Image (cartoon, grey):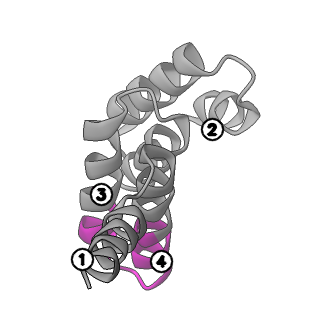
Amino acid sequence: MIKYVIAIVVVAVVSGCESNETRLQSFLLKGNESLATGDEQKALYYYAEALKMDPCYADALNNSGTIDHNHGNYEAAIASYSKAIECNPVYLNAWFNRSKS
């Protein structure tokens, strides 16, 4: 009986553990889905949550910058794109987006 209880606990613990990368991607996906449905504030929330976990998450920085750019907040957009480039110098989307801002 004790073996079964231990097995259940181990399975529960292992299945409940998400890697940081998985959580980052989940926040990015939720943000992108929110953006696709027009809920920019919710998208920004999810991108901010990802950035709390990893302040150098270039995808979230880039997407946040795009929302700022679309609202005419060019300085904030450039700051987000520049940080994305600083974190990942080969991230072409951020280079391209910064050149448009």
- For marks 3 and 4, give the CA distance: 11 Å
Which mark is nearer the camera, 1 or 2? 1
Residue matched to label 1 = 2
**N-terminal label among 4 and 1:** 1
**N-terminal label among 3 and 4:** 4
Asked whether 20 or 38 is in front, the reply is 20
Measured from the top left, where is residue 37 in percent x and y?
44, 85
Which residues are drawn in magenta? Answer: 30-44
Query: Quarter of the image containing the N terminus?
Result: bottom left
8 to 17, vertically: above or below: below
Residue matched to label 2 = 97
Give yes or no for residue 12 being in the magenta stretch: no
Instruction: Tell me, for residue 33, which label it has, or none.
Output: 4
Chief secondary structure of the magenta span?
A: helix
**N-terminal label among 3 and 2:** 3
The reply to whether the C-beta atoms of the residues labelled 3 and 2 are less than 8 Å apart is no
Which class describes the residues within 10 Å of circle 1: few (<14), some (14-19), or many (20+)? few
Residue matched to label 3 = 44
Measured from the top left, where is residue 22 in percent x and y?
49, 56
Asked whether 13 or 65 is in front, the reply is 13
The type of residue carrying mark 4 is Glu
- For marks 4 and 1, give the CA distance: 44 Å
Which class describes the residues within 10 Å of circle 4: few (<14), some (14-19), or many (20+)? some
Measured from the top left, where is residue 4 in percent x and y?
33, 82
Asked whether 76 or 93 is in front, the reply is 93
